[in-house]
Amino acid sequence: MQRILSSQLPAQVGSTVRLAGWVHRRRLLKSVAFLVLRDGGGLAQVVVAAPAVRAQVEALTEETVVEVVGTVVANPAAPAGVEVVEPTVRPLGPPAVPPPFDLYRPVLTAGLSTQLDHAPVALRHPIRSAALRISAAAVSGFRATLDGQGFVEVHTPKVVASSTESGANVFALDWFGRPAYLAQSPQFYKQLMVGVFERVYEVGPVFRAEPHDTARHLAQYTSLDVELGFVADHRDVMAVLRDTLAGMVATVADRAGGALATLGVTVPEVPAEIPAVHFTEALKIAGAPADEPDLAPAHERALGEWALREHGSDFLFVTGYPMAKRPFYTHPDPARPAYSNGFDLLFRGVELVTGGQRLHRHADYLAALAARGEPVEPYAGYVDAFRHGMPPHGGFAIGLERFVARLTGAANVREVTAFPRDLHRLTP
């Protein structure tokens, strides 16, 4: 008999089925026992009346892996309106050691630190696993949207010879006796691949050795990177980003509806045209000094509230950041060279995406590095490619965990990350 998932039970009323999963909970009443089985499809209620089977169930511990064979009957009070009766129960392994918290409760009562210490079992809780299902759907939507627009997925090195973002902290390592670093982003490589495919994207880990200890930062996170050639300016990039976000949100709604329901989340609408303000105007809206070089988290929150109030939008573009706060490869605004053809996208008052137009002429790269007092040699393999003809291009990067955290309302990005790596955590 082929195993089925609990989610398939409603179509099997009257049939004998085989389930397999984890003992989620046992309820031992006087006349009957209930075994709640958890599997990849959800929960199934198993009704146990036979004394011998009840004795088996009483001996089981939560999280023990078992097989159940029984008959499916309708019961409106049971999960999905069905339950399994007259079962046989067979353990598929030794009795499990119960985790240090009850997974059958509606919410995990353990603190986040305890959950992260015991992540392999904490992630089994429906609330924790729901966030990961949403994450998977978001990546699927990201890929599908870009595939539909002629982009090619690429895979670039995560060990590099020089830092990507000049001046940023990097994780150093020994590469057969030579210094090397974990990549802070695929920035250089995705630009170079524009010279091959014109439109590329990548889903992969990035590493930032910045000593942040906040609810929104990780030392390793998943970056959804995009780069496209033959743009007029950064606004072409913003248009692709808008479509990409719309595709991600639509796929989450379509493929992770159960996870959204578990978390009580409604996906936001991505406007046909996301509102945009220039950095100088953003400072005024946020009540920040006119000479402020960047937006602080409090400024971003104020801008998010403004976008929702004035435009009914959870999303807001802030364009034209000062060149002094952008990487050396950023293209300046030809009309206002002190400001960039770059942007950030705020999602519910938190910076989610950074992007913009890049330099594409070799001479401009030499001048940009010289202006910052940086030698060309560490970047030679990157900069030299621009001698061979590169189109005007630009791109962006979405932080996956931050996107899911904002979408689900999680207070801490670690709540939606399977095995987070940060200033203090290297295990499990």
Image (cartoon, grey):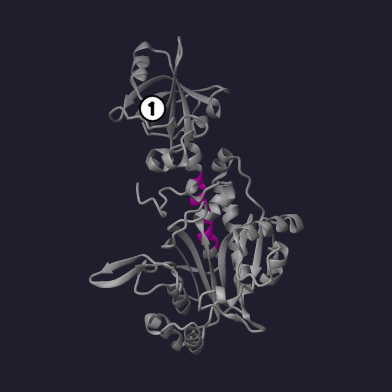
Q: Position of residue 73 (x, y in %)?
A: 50, 22
Q: Position of residue 126 (x, y in %)?
A: 49, 37
Q: Quadrant of the N terminus?
A: top left
Q: Is residue 137 magenta?
A: yes
| Residue matched to label 1 | 62
Q: Is residue 113 left or right of residue 234?
A: left
Task: Look at the image and give the residue range highlighted in magenta.
Answer: 131-145
Visible in this render: residue 307? yes
Q: Residue furthest right?
A: 310
Examine the rendered structure and indicate whether residue 401 appears above or below residue 234.
above
Q: Amino acid at mark 1?
A: Glu
Examine the rendered structure and indicate whether residue 266 appears above or below residue 200.
above
Q: Residue at (60%, 58%) from the top-left corner?
A: 297
Q: Position of residue 149 (x, y in %)?
A: 56, 67
Residue at disc 1, secondary structure: loop
Q: Residue furthest left?
A: 177
Q: Is residue 179 left or right of residue 386?
A: left
Q: Is residue 19 left or right of residue 106?
A: left
Residue 299 falls in which quadrant of the image?
bottom right
Examine the rendered structure and indicate whether residue 282 appears above or below residue 382.
above
